[in-house]
Image (spheres, rainbow, N blue to C red):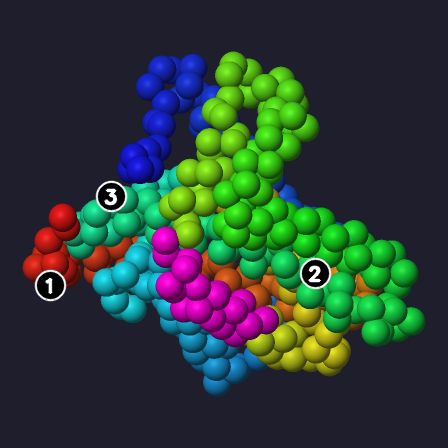
């Protein structure tokens, strides 16, 4: 697999276009958070910040500890996808990549390129790194699309206690998530199914994608088979570490979200909190803003408001969670990058030479 590359604009027109995209994306994030969230929750930033600053340092440090525990859990997914990677290396790569992704619109490509550079500095092979990036991307996608499925199952027993629109939305989202997850699992499980999924994508989505992107698209069947070949070797022997690491990460972050609600005085059931958490995590995949910031908070806030949570507490809770799940990753990512630059020689000597 070729190393991930980031295409930097080289002409004045391309530079201006890229700058406009960055400004528009960051502007949208500022509007969604700065104006949209207080408007949606019918409150003000003075009230929101007052609730957040009132939680106290012991509570803040407890929430920070939960955040770090969640990040440590995710290192098992990374070490499972890249045999020989240590947990300290994994947390450095995760934080540095996330810090870049959270800073730039569409920063996922830059984050992947930085992660690739870090792994190569530790003398892992191109093939092993490429497989690791693909496997972790697929596992993260599976986790996010399965969250609505779990939310639907959690909300159905309490259908009479929540708005019908929310239950119906959870069911529709659950069906969609199950379909995407089923397609990914089928590609991994069967070569024949991988061909069928690729053929389906070509016939159903191919004309639309050609119209949107223009030009000739890669063979979807070959891509599905290549995806399967890269994933299956790692997944066959290390699926447990991959899965438990991601389940632990998502689970700890859900507890973190629930504790953020409790810290600002919101007392709702765990099932209702999970519904809001699932929507927010799913919307982090929206790339119109860096890391989905603003979009995820608006989605989670809409669910909490529908459940009857007061607007000021809703805004404070989702903002507090964004602090730990998004904003703090930026300075921590910078610290991780500096640590990598100063320790890569040691880990390169410790790592066996790449064949």
Q: Is residue 167 left or right of residue 235?
A: right
Q: Give above or below for 335 relative to 155.
A: above
Q: Is residue 83 left or right of residue 305?
A: left
Q: Secondary structure at mark 1?
A: helix
Q: Give above or below for 91 relative to 220.
A: below
Mark 2 or 1, nearer chain start:
2
Q: Quadrant of residue 158?
A: bottom right
Q: Quadrant of residue 344?
A: bottom left
How many C-alpha atoms fall within 10 Å of the one at disc 2: few (<14), some, or many (≥20)? many
Q: Position of residue 336 (x, y in %)?
A: 28, 59
On-image quarter of the N terminus = top left
Q: Secondary structure at mark 3?
A: helix
Of residues 39 and 295, the one nearer the viewer is 295
* Cα–Cα gap, marks 1 and 3: 18 Å
**Bounds of the magenta span?**
233-254
How many C-alpha atoms fall within 10 Å of the one at disc 1: few (<14), some, or many (≥20)? few
The residue lying at 43 percent from left, 64 percent from top is 239
The residue lying at 52 percent from left, 32 percent from top is 221
Q: Is there CB contact under 8 Å for labels 3 and 2?
A: no
* Residue 350 marker: 1
Mark 3 or 2, nearer chain start:
3
How many C-alpha atoms fall within 10 Å of the one at disc 3: few (<14), some, or many (≥20)? some
Mark 1 or 3, nearer chain start:
3
Where is mark 2, residue-wise? 149
Q: Position of residue 274 (x, y in %)?
A: 68, 69
Q: Secondary structure at mark 2?
A: helix
Q: Give above or below for 281 relative to 52.
A: above
Q: Position of residue 57 (x, y in %)?
A: 48, 81
Where is mark 3, residue-wise? 126
Q: Is residue 277 magenta?
A: no
């Amino acid at each position: 697999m070729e190393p991930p590359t980031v295409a930097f604009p080289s002409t004045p027109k391309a530079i201006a276009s890229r700058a406009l995209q960055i400004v528009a994306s960051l502007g949208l994030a500022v509007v969604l958070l700065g104006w949209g969230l207080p408007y949606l929750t019918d409150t003000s930033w003075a009230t929101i910040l007052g609730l957040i600053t009132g939680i106290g340092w012991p509570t803040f440090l407890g929430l920070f500890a939960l955040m770090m525990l969640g990040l440590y859990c995710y290192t098992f997914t990374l070490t499972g996808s890249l045999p020989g990677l240590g947990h300290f290396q994994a947390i450095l790569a995760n934080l540095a990549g996330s810090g870049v992704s959270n800073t730039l619109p569409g920063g996922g490509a830059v984050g992947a390129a930085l992660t690739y550079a870090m792994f190569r500095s530790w003398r892992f092979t191109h093939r092993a790194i490429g497989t690791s990036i693909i496997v972790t991307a697929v596992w993260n996608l599976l986790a996010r699309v399965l969250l609505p499925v779990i939310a639907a199952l959690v909300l159905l027993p309490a259908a009479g206690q929540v708005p019908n629109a929310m239950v119906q939305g959870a069911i529709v989202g659950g069906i969609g998530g199950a379909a995407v997850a089923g397609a990914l699992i089928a590609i991994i499980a069967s070569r024949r199914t991988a061909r069928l999924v690729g053929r389906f994508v070509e016939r159903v989505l191919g004309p639309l994608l050609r119209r949107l992107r223009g030009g000739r698209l890669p063979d979807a069947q070959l891509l599905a088979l290549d995806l399967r070949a890269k994933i299956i070797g790692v997944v066959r022997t290390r699926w447990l570490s991959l899965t438990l690491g991601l389940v632990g990460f998502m689970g700890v972050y859900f507890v973190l979200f629930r504790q953020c609600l409790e810290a600002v005085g919101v007392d709702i059931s765990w099932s209702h909190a999970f519904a809001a958490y699932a929507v927010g995590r799913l919307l982090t995949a929206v790339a119109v803003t860096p890391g989905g910031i603003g979009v995820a908070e608006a989605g989670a806030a809409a669910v909490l408001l529908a459940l009857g949570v007061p607007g000021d507490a809703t805004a404070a809770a989702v903002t507090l969670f964004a602090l730990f799940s998004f904003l703090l990753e930026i300075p921590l990512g910078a610290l991780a990058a500096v640590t990598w630059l100063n320790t890569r020689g040691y880990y390169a000597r410790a790592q066996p030479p790449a064949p």
